Structures are given as structure tokens and as C-alpha cells.
Image: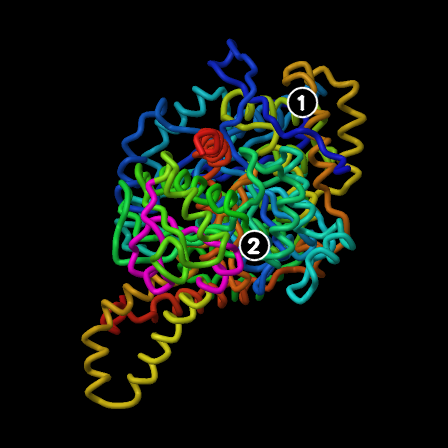
């Protein structure tokens, strides 16, 4: 590891967050497993954003860790994919799926809470202390796991609370013991900040409100870049380079980007002041040159015209943390039971 | 003034490094009056949210929801949707069902229907969908958008299911126009309705030679109001129209004609009777079901067929009525419309925009009127 000071740690999920992966059916799973590194497709804008986050010439460095639910047998292909993208993760953890099967731990094959939380705590133990930003998706339980991890790091969940959450989540006792041990040794520094959830399935943003405004559901990485710019974690140039990449390589137009910008303002993840600051910064930015003439003016013109007029809106609802993790698990369980209890065509369970 | 910039888009085309900027109209935008109708904004926002999930970036359709920003945001917050494809435009007021259209429109230029029309007129959207006050919607649309082909009036076109199918698409629906865009129509305007209806049937049903009929109180060409008698003459003499002749109200559901032409007042009454009859038939069937065991058994045996008829006569299945004769695509939904009806109206709007319907109707009218 480099001797440079670590200024920030970015923790990423892989499938549906970094890679466009389908694993909803067995056919998808097989096709994904057989894909060559060259055939794997990135989520639009992710590589540009990740490079912008890690590239700063200020005598410090950013750490990038990937914790994925993909089986460890995929490592060579995935490492080759990172190589092709020009990304060098500092830590890359994959799931021991085969070991789980051989040990008969079938719940752990699909379950994520135990595996991911244990991995996050393990990686954190061996790493430096620095502010953290997390990236996941809406396909599994990333928002739940990341929020819990953030609250553990912030000292907002105690041991008994953690035990109950893990118990309700159906985490195997050995994994639970490991998590509790790591928790006992954990640095409580409140270092975990933003949590971005890529809405691969276009889930309702309201679904994540239970975790509070720290969790930002995003449809694309331009939105993530805008929030990081508003947080002053990024300057304007990287944001414009992410936009330029989406325009140039992924078929986006100014309308889609303006809609994405407006969406964040509507949900109160960005304030109107972000538009003004962006407008001022754009006058002095060199990156504007990499965009179509008048792009920033057109983008901001549309956003201003569409900007919310009043207060209120979904994201201004009162929220008092920490989240009720047990309540979330219970709600999920009830939902599953409702779906399973629905009568089939002839009144039987499907 | 909308304080708006043009939405005509610039997209990059070509491989990276050899990028060139081209003006693109690949994606289309549908403006939706989110506050109109009995189930607004929930039904309209839900339909748009669902529609936003279809198609990818650059090839899809964008939606411009016009209405109370907070109400729309609240509704969207709880729905699966693709935020890249949805814009909101704040319009603080709404014209209620009980209001007089003309008075309300003049009093409230900030209403959702007026603002939606203004956005379409400004080129921010290609079509308008509304489930609001029908009178206000027609008036706002006709005030904002010009008429095509020298036509004196726009016509609201409704469809009604019949046993006959027509055109390449095996369309079971007859088109009836006008069903209430205006009350009266001159004979020349009824001829225009015939030309517009024919053009619509050719484009939407791919029915090359649609049969046009004139709704009257008799099959006799000399019967009816003076306007109907004169319209019969004009329609029968016209080369561009395959004129079937006059038909009576009871012949509409038999599907004798593909396009039925009438004044707005008559059409509105006729279509509501037709809707009412099918609803009443199902109410009677429901009552009969509880009356006698034998009838219940009979209805059980017929349930598959009855379900099919119910689906066919369900107004939600065909979403909305196009307001024909305007320079823009306008689809008006029934004020009772729920999510499914609005979703189907959005589909119809997209189909009409892609078919460049206003231009096609203008062309049909230009050709037809010059012959007439």
C-alpha cells in the first residue's frame, strides 16, 4: 500500500452498481458466468466517476474497495475486467459460494446481510481511518447493510441491537459471532458519509426513506457526481466529465441529464444553491470545452425552469434516525409471506 | 412567458474520438395534465411512472408532468419510475369539473391544462394528454394550437367496439366523430370530419379504404336536418371518401361503418348511450346471477365470453379520444380514467406522434378539400 495519506475510502458493490449484470433467472446467471471480461458491460458513467474520485494530485490518495456477492471463482475474469477499465481496487472481496454449498450453508448462498457486513467490518479493521462513501444498488439489501454499517461506525447501534438484527436476518451463528467480535474491536468514528444506491430496477425512491437522507437513490452516476459536488467532495470539472461521457458514449441528451438534476432537487438531495454555484463555477471551468457548445447554459436553463417552487416533497418528510432495522426486516418478511400466500390459479399456493 | 429554453436536443453521434454533434428528435415528449380527472394526480403520475420504465435512454419517450409540484413529487416518491425520463412543471391551480370552461380558463392561466398546452405550443412536448374538464381541455387546446388544412373545427374522435374487424390490424373499433368538441357543425365541417376520420383510420387501423357513414335519423338521404342533408350530398360526391351513406344510431354497434360522422351534440349523446347500454347490460347480468340458480349456471357457462365482451367495452382499454384537426396531438381521457386508461392514452399519444398524425390529416384535408 502506498505511503500517501488516505483522504477518502470508496466502498463499492460490483453487480448492478459497477457492472450491468443480470442474475434474476438461472439463464441470466449462466450467461453472466460465461461472459468474457471483454463482454462485461459497465453501468454508464461509473468508470469515469470512479477515476475522477481516485485521481487528485494533492499528495493524498483515495482507497477503493469492492465487496461483491459474485462467487470467488469469477475473480480472474473480474480482475481482468478492472484491468481493461483501468481500475485498480485496493481490496476486492468475493463471496465463497462454493464453500457455502459444500458446508450446506444454503441460506448464505443467496443471503447478503451476514456476508457483506462481516466483509465490510473485516476490511475496515485492516484499513486506515478516513471518511467513507458507499455505492450499492437496489437489487438486494445494500441500503440496509450499508446503513447498518454506517450506524455501527457511528456508535448508533449497540451490541444487543446488532445481535437482534442479525438474528432476525437469519445470519448463521458462526458469521454472527464473527460480526459481533469485529464490532467489539471496531473504531467508532462516524466516518461513513454518503450512501449511493443505484436504482438498477428503478425502485421507488421512497422505499429507501426509512434509512434517512444519508442514503441517496440515484438513477445514473451524473446524479452521484452532482451530490458529491454539492458535498464539496468533487469539483465541477469531474462532474462535467461524467456528463460528457454519458453524452458521448451512452446516448444521453441534455433532457435526460436535466431531468436527473431536477429529480435530485425535487427529492431535496440538492438545494437550489447548487444550481447557482454550478453556474458560477462553469464560467471558469475548462471542462466545459469537452461538452457541446452552450451545454451548461441549456442544462441549467431547463433545470431552473423545472425547479421546484414550493417546500415539501418526499425528501423533506421528518426523519429521525437511526433506522428501525428490525422493523425493516419484519416488513420484508410480511411482504414475502403475503406474496407466498396469494392463491394460485386453482386456489393453491404457487 | 415560461422562462424556458428549447428542448430540441443535441446528442453525440459517432464513435468516441470522432464525435460529431447532431440535432436529434429521436425521443419524443408527452405533456400530461397531471391534475385533471377524478383520480388526479395519482392515476396520471402512476401511468407516467409506469410508461417511463419502457424503452432505453435515447430511444424512449420523455414525459412532462404539469401540475402541483409537491403533489406530483409525493406521488412519484412512492412509485417505481425512471427519473431520467420524467420532468415536472409546476402549475399551481386546476380547473374543476363543475366550472364553466371559458370563465375558468380566462381566470386561471396558471392552471395545469393551460400550462400544459403552452408547453406543447412552445415545442417542449409533442403531444398532450389530459383527463381533466373536457370542455376546458378542448377550449385550451383549440386556443393554443392552430387548425390544420383550413378546417373550421376540430373534432373529438371516440371509438366503439363492434363485431366486425377492419384494416390490417383487425381493428374491432368504429371511429365516431365529433363526440363533443363542439355542439354544431356546418355541412362542410362534417365533410372535413369525414376526411379526418378516413385519414385516422388509414394511419391507425391501417385500413386503406375506410367506410364513412353519416349519423342521421334515417337511411334516406333526404331525411334529417338541413345540415345533414347537405353533408350527405358533399360526402357522396367526394372521391377521397368511401361513403357508405346514412346510418341510424342502432347501426353504430353493428359496425356497418368504419367512421361515423356527426355533429358534436349528437355524437356526445350517442356515445354516452352506447357506453350506458353496455354498463347496464352487465348490471342486469349481475342482478340475474343472484336471481335464479339456473340463470347463475347459464352465466357461469357464458362467463368467458362475457369477460371478453366486458374487456372490449371497457373504456379504460382504449384510454382516450384524439382531438383531431389540430396541429398537435391531443388525447382526452374520460374524467373517470384510472392508471390503466391513462397508460393506454399515453400509448395512443405516442403512436399518433410517431405516425405524424397532424401532418397526415393536414395532407388528407388539403387533398380532399381541393377535390371537394
Quick one: quadrant of the C terminus of chain B?
top left
Residue at figure coordinates x 37%, y 31% from the top left: A75
- The one of B12 and A161 positioned closer to us in this rendering: B12
Residue B182 vertical placement versus B27 (above, below): below
The residue that mark 2 highlights is B184
- Residue A195: % across, % down: 60, 44
Quadrant, the N terminus of chain B: top right
Q: Residues within 10 Å of mark 1 (few under 14, many from 20)?
A: some
Q: Nearer the viewer, mark 1 or mark 2?
A: 2
> Who is closer to the viewer here, B103 or A64?
B103
At 64% from the left edge and 64% from the top edge, which residue is drawn?
Answer: B97
First to last magenta residue range: B242-270
Q: CA distance from mark 1 to mark 2?
A: 50 Å
* Horizontal and vertical percent position of residue A249: 50, 22
Chain letter of the residue beneath label 2 in the structure image? B
- What SS does tag 1 mark? helix
Q: Residue furthest front?
A: B222
Query: Which residue shows up at 26% across the image and 42% down it?
Result: A27
Q: Is residue A330 above or below residue B138?
A: below
Query: In the displayed structure, would residue A300 be above or below residue A101?
Result: above
Q: Does the rendering let one see residue A119?
A: no
The question of residue B120 being in magenta is answered with no
**Can the viewer see residue B171 in this picture?**
yes
Give the total of numbered labels: 2
Residue A262: percent from left, percent from top? 67, 40
Circle 1 residue:
A295
B182 sits to left or right of A156: left
Residue at the extreme top of the image, as rendered: B18
Does the stretch in magenta take in B245?
A: yes
Amino acid at each position: 500500500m502506498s505511503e500517501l495519506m488516505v483522504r477518502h475510502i470508496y466502498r463499492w458493490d460490483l453487480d448492478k452498481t459497477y457492472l450491468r449484470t443480470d442474475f434474476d433467472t438461472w439463464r441470466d446467471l449462466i450467461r453472466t458466468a460465461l461472459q468474457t471480461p471483454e463482454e462485461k458491460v459497465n453501468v454508464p458513467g461509473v468508470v469515469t466517476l470512479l477515476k475522477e474520485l481516485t485521481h487528485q494530485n494533492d499528495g493524498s490518495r483515495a482507497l477503493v474497495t469492492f465487496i461483491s456477492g459474485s462467487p470467488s471463482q469469477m475473480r480472474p475474469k473480474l480482475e481482468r475486467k478492472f484491468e481493461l477499465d483501468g481500475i485498480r481496487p485496493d481490496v476486492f472481496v468475493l463471496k465463497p459460494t462454493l464453500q457455502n454449498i459444500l458446508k450446506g450453508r444454503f441460506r448464505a448462498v443467496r443471503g447478503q446481510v451476514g456476508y457483506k457486513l462481516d466483509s465490510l467490518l473485516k476490511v475496515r479493521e485492516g484499513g486506515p481511518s478516513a471518511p467513507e462513501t458507499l455505492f450499492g444498488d437496489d437489487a438486494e439489501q445494500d441500503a440496509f447493510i450499508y446503513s447498518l454499517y454506517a450506524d455501527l461506525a457511528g456508535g448508533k447501534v449497540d451490541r444487543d441491537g446488532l445481535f437482534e438484527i442479525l438474528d432476525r436476518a437469519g445470519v448463521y451463528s458462526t458469521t454472527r459471532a464473527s460480526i459481533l467480535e469485529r464490532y467489539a474491536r471496531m473504531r467508532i468514528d462516524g466516518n461513513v458519509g454518503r450512501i449511493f444506491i443505484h436504482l438498477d430496477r428503478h425502485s421507488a425512491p421512497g422505499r429507501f426513506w426509512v434509512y434517512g437522507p444519508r442514503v441517496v437513490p440515484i438513477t445514473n452516476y451524473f446524479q452521484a457526481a452532482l451530490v458529491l459536488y454539492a458535498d464539496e467532495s468533487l469539483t465541477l470539472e469531474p462532474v462535467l466529465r461524467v456528463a460528457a461521457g454519458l453524452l458521448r458514449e451512452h446516448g444521453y441528451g441534455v433532457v435526460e441529464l436535466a431531468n436527473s438534476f431536477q429529480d435530485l432537487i425535487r427529492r431535496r438531495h440538492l438545494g437550489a444553491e447548487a444550481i447557482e454555484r454550478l453556474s458560477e463555477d462553469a464560467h471558469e471551468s475548462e471542462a466545459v470545452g469537452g461538452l457541446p457548445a452552450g451545454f451548461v447554459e441549456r442544462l441549467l436553463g431547463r433545470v431552473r425552469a423545472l425547479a421546484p417552487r414550493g417546500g415539501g416533497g418526499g425528501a423533506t418528510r421528518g426523519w429521525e434516525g437511526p433506522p428501525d432495522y428490525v422493523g425493516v426486516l419484519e416488513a420484508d418478511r410480511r411482504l414475502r409471506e403475503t406474496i407466498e400466500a396469494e392463491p394460485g390459479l386453482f386456489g393453491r399456493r404457487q | 412567458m415560461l422562462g424556458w429554453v428549447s428542448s430540441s436536443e443535441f446528442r453525440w453521434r459517432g464513435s468516441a474520438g470522432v464525435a460529431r454533434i447532431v440535432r436529434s428528435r429521436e425521443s419524443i415528449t408527452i405533456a400530461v395534465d397531471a391534475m385533471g380527472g377524478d383520480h388526479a394526480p395519482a392515476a396520471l403520475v402512476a401511468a407516467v411512472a409506469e410508461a417511463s420504465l419502457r424503452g432505453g435512454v435515447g430511444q424512449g419517450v420523455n414525459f412532462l408532468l404539469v401540475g402541483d409540484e409537491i403533489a406530483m413529487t409525493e406521488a412519484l416518491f412512492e412509485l417505481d419510475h425512471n427519473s431520467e425520463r420524467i420532468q415536472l412543471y409546476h402549475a399551481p391551480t386546476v380547473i374543476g369539473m363543475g366550472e364553466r370552461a371559458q370563465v375558468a380558463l380566462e381566470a386561471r392561466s396558471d392552471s395545469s391544462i393551460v400550462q400544459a398546452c403552452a408547453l406543447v405550443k412552445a415545442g417542449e412536448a409533442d403531444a398532450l394528454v389530459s383527463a381533466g374538464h373536457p370542455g376546458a381541455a378542448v377550449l385550451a387546446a383549440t386556443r393554443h394550437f392552430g387548425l390544420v388544412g383550413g378546417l373550421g373545427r376540430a373534432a373529438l374522435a371516440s371509438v366503439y367496439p363492434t363485431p366486425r374487424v377492419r384494416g390490417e390490424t383487425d381493428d374491432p373499433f368504429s371511429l365516431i366523430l365529433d363526440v363533443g368538441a363542439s355542439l354544431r357543425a356546418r355541412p362542410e365541417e362534417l365533410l372535413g370530419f369525414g376526411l379526418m376520420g378516413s385519414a385516422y383510420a388509414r394511419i391507425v387501423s391501417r385500413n386503406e379504404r375506410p367506410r364513412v357513414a353519416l349519423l342521421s335519423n334515417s337511411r334516406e338521404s333526404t331525411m334529417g336536418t338541413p345540415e345533414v342533408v347537405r353533408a350527405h350530398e358533399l360526402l357522396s360526391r367526394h372521391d377521397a371518401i368511401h361513403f357508405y351513406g346514412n346510418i341510424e344510431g342502432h347501426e353504430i354497434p353493428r359496425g356497418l361503418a368504419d367512421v361515423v360522422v356527426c355533429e358534436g351534440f349528437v355524437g356526445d349523446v350517442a356515445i354516452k348511450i352506447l357506453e350506458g347500454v353496455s354498463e347496464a347490460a352487465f348490471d342486469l347480468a349481475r342482478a340475474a346471477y343472484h336471481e335464479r340458480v339456473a340463470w347463475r349456471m347459464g352465466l357461469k357457462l357464458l362467463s368467458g365470453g362475457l369477460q371478453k365482451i366486458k374487456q372490449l367495452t371497457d373504456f379504460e382499454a382504449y384510454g382516450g379520444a384524439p382531438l383531431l384537426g389540430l396541429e398537435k396531438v391531443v388525447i382526452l381521457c374520460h374524467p373517470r380514467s384510472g392508471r390503466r386508461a391513462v397508460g393506454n392514452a399515453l400509448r395512443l399519444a405516442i403512436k399518433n406522434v410517431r405516425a405524424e398524425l397532424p401532418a397526415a390529416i393536414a395532407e388528407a384535408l388539403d387533398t380532399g378539400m381541393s377535390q371537394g
